Image (cartoon, helix red, strand yellow):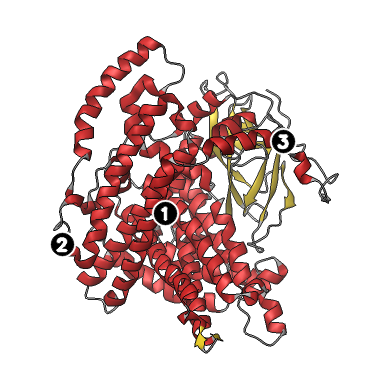
Amino acid sequence: MNHQAGTSTHHVDAARAREVAEQSRDQEWQRPSFAKGLYMGDVDFSLIDPFPQPDPEAAARGEQFLQVLDDVVDSIDATRIETEGRIPDETVAALREIGAFGMKIPRKYGGLELSLLDYGRALMRIGSVSPAIGALLSAHQSIGVPEPVKSFGTEEQKQAYLPRCAAGAISAFLLTENDVGSDPARLGTTARLGDDGEHYVIDGAKLWTTNGVVAELLVVMAAVEPHEAHGDAPAGKGGITAFIVEADTEGVTVENRNAFMGLRGIENGVTRFRQVRVPTANRLGKEGSGLKIALSTLNTGRLSIPAMCAGAGKWATKIAREWSAARVQWGHPVGKHQAIASKLSYIASSTYALEAVFELSASLADAGMKDVRIEAALAKLYSSEVSCTIADELLQIRGGRGYETAASQAARGERAVPVEQLLRDLRINRIFEGSTEIMHLLIAREAVDAHLQAAGDLAKADSTMEEKAKAAWGASGFYAKWLPQLALGSGNLPNAYSGHGPLARHLRFVERASRRIARQSFAGMARWQAGMERQQVFLGHIVDIGAELFAMSAVITKTHALEMNGSPEHASALVLAEAFCEQATERCEEHFERLWDNTTQTDEQVAKQLLNGDFRWLEAGIRDVSEGTGPWIAEWSTGDQEDRRQLYGDS
């Protein structure tokens, strides 16, 4: 293999890419999952209701830290960060002093050992003031060195690195390359076991390295070459492997600090590795286990995004309320006009849902009794999409002031409200840690897992007719038992879930819609078999319906918990829950309608002709100022992208 940094010279077809992804996926379900049941027509509300309760001691520690954090958050100059594009050193120092870089690290290693719920609440507070600081802390703790070392590191690695991270040694996670995003089978960064058997030699380059510009410690994913035994090191089959790398190691170079439309204080760049020697003791897990480590880390690491999205929703709700009450048009506050009232209802009820989705997902993960891989993925997908819509609706309510920068408003003597910045800052969440399109495919793969297992060779494009016939016989037994269960359920009983009062009807809808999803998934499998995975629009609607049902379930569970706890907020929360569930029901029905009645075939034809240049006449009359400024893909990373387009679409 060519060892030129960042250059991928091998060809990886779609089948191989799928094989690598499948091998890295946890294929067993040893613990129950509420969200998985939603997609299989098997809703078990007892898995989420009553709402999981936190450990009292952990909750007390969390509350104490949040009070300390509030003082630091109040001192943050968000305007300075936006203007200068950097987080001030004194702000980082203040966060270090209170232990904010060790929120998720166990106390035995110098951390605070907060629950995921309180960790998210902390990010919610920080992110509402400066999403760039939220990105700094979450990239460090959710996917940087602390999480994989805590979960997969040896005791020696934990002793060596966790105390440093807790004290504020910033870390970063490096996977993405210029031609490798959601298709890690094409990874171009390599690691070769040295002749002494005591070091690996890493060559390559990584793109969009959040925290990479200022990091002291790195988790680097590299493809280890198969090797013979060297010294005390046994022979190895290689594969994608995770390494802990000191950022000041000779050969590690930060080549660029990237700039973006939002998150202007984020430290994100390009990092190159030239013959970087890393001790074998710094390998995380076994050779070839890197993707499993990454995916496992992301299962709970993704929950940082829903937390910050919920914080953004809360801020948007506050601004929408204050402005819509103060701004008068045609003799009435704008909030009393029906067109604006519908937007206010959406913003407030959806924010309540964002908080419920985050709290439920984090609480389930904290409890450790459920498998939350789908819950965490749904939370990330749903929150990143909904929060962007909330921000867009808030901008519309604010009108010209929503589009105007906060600095410009201040210069005119008005209150500086950074709504346009909110929209810019939130937009990355639909791409961070798995784009919306990739999340659809990831969730769909997990959601239809039982179908694929039952179908066996029917779901494999390269199966022979004999193998498919045998698989069909086996699948018939599974579906003979499963399909009749989808005909009727508790959702058809008028008195079901009566303990939830007026929200019972919405729980009945969730149950009925769950069985409907399952029937539609079966119909899709029967129609497309091995071609099911390429039906990305169909699968996207299936996933989105499940996301809405999960959000409805979270809202109902949270509202029920408020009632059981005698909370004074219950009555008003019930109003928000009713509104959200009614809105979500309408969205579900729209998705169901578009499962089979859509423009997919026409869209594919238009896209094909567009890519072939058939519509270049449509581009006449414009001037492209980007022409001649450089290639689409930087020269340090090359490779045919056709396989990734076939497998993942354009994302």
Q: Nearer the viewer, mark 1 or mark 2?
A: 2
**Rendered image: mark on residue 637:** 3
Figure quadrant of residue 57: bottom left
**Rendered image: mark on residue 200:** none
Q: Nearer the viewer, mark 3 or mark 1?
A: 1
Pointer 1 local density, CA inside 10 Å: few below 14, some 14–19, many at least 20:
many
Residue at the image position 49 percent from the left and 63 percent from the top: 308
Who comes first in sequence, dot 2 or dot 3? Answer: 2
Residue underneath mark 2: 498
Who comes first in sequence, dot 3 or dot 1? Answer: 1
- Kindly tell me whether residue 69 is visible in this rendering: no
| Label 1 residue SS | helix
> Residue 388, image x and y in percent?
53, 61
Callout 2 touching callout 3 (CB < 8 Å): no
Q: Amino acid at mark 1?
A: Ala
Residue at the image position 30 percent from the left and 26 percent from the top: 454
Q: Amino acid at mark 3?
A: Ser
Residue underneath mark 1: 379
| Label 3 residue SS | loop
> Residue 617, image x and y in percent?
78, 41
